[in-house]
Image (cartoon, rainbow, N blue to C red):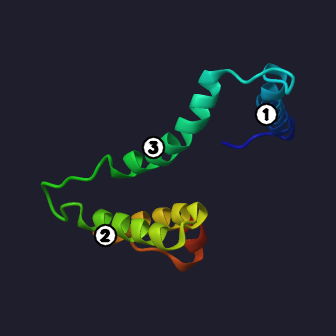
Amino acid sequence: MILSVQQSLVLVSLITLGTFLTRGMSFILFPNSKETPKYILYLGNVLPFAAIGLPIVYCLKNVSILSAPYGIPEGIAIVCVVMLHLWKYSFTVIVYLLKLSLRLSLCNCYNIKIKERNFYYVFI
């Protein structure tokens, strides 16, 4: 779908406005003069783990352990990511390596050929 200049400007403006409102809303709802509600503090402690777990569930949703390759490539990718996490403890490295290893394992399992010119778009 190709957008006109006016449509592109409206789209970018709405996205900018939505981002500004959602980022600034927390300062309006929870000013420094008031104490933050306990359920918001609870969500702040619980949601980061859910945010890490959600992509893992999404990546593994179609893995079948009953048919070849039995989830072995994905298992190897997960073991490598866990070992790297225990070694370096860097979430940024973990997220990118998880993406890379799962995409590589999927490409190898299904014999997908990767063109060199699209390497950046496939793996990043």
- Residue bearing mark 1: 23
Indicate which disc, 1 or 2, sits on the residue closer to the N terminus: 1
In which quadrant will I find the C terminus?
bottom right
Q: Quadrant of residue 120?
A: bottom right
CA–CA distance between discs 1 and 3? 22 Å
Q: Where is residue 56 in the image (x, y as percent from the top left)?
A: 41, 50
Q: Which amino acid does label 1 sit on?
A: Arg
Left or right relative to 75: residue 8: right
Task: Identify the residue at image location x=24%, y=61%.
Answer: 71
Kind of residue at badge 3: Leu
Rendering quarter of residue 23: top right
> Is residue 98 depicted above or below 42 in this figure?
below
From the viewer's perspective, is 35 left or right of 43? right
Q: In which quarter of the image is the N terminus?
A: top right
53 or 66: which is nearer to us?
A: 53
| Tag shown at residue 76 | 2
Mark 1 or mark 3, which has the lower sequence index? Answer: 1
- Please indicate whether residue 33 sits to the left or right of residue 45 in the image: right
Choose the circle earlier in sequence order: 2 or 3: 3
The reply to whether the C-beta atoms of the residues labelled 2 and 3 are less than 8 Å apart is: no
At label 1, counting other C-alpha atoms closer than 10 Å, the crowd grade (few under 14, some 14-19, many 20 or more) is few
* Residue occupied by mark 3: 54
Q: Which amino acid does label 2 sit on?
A: Ile
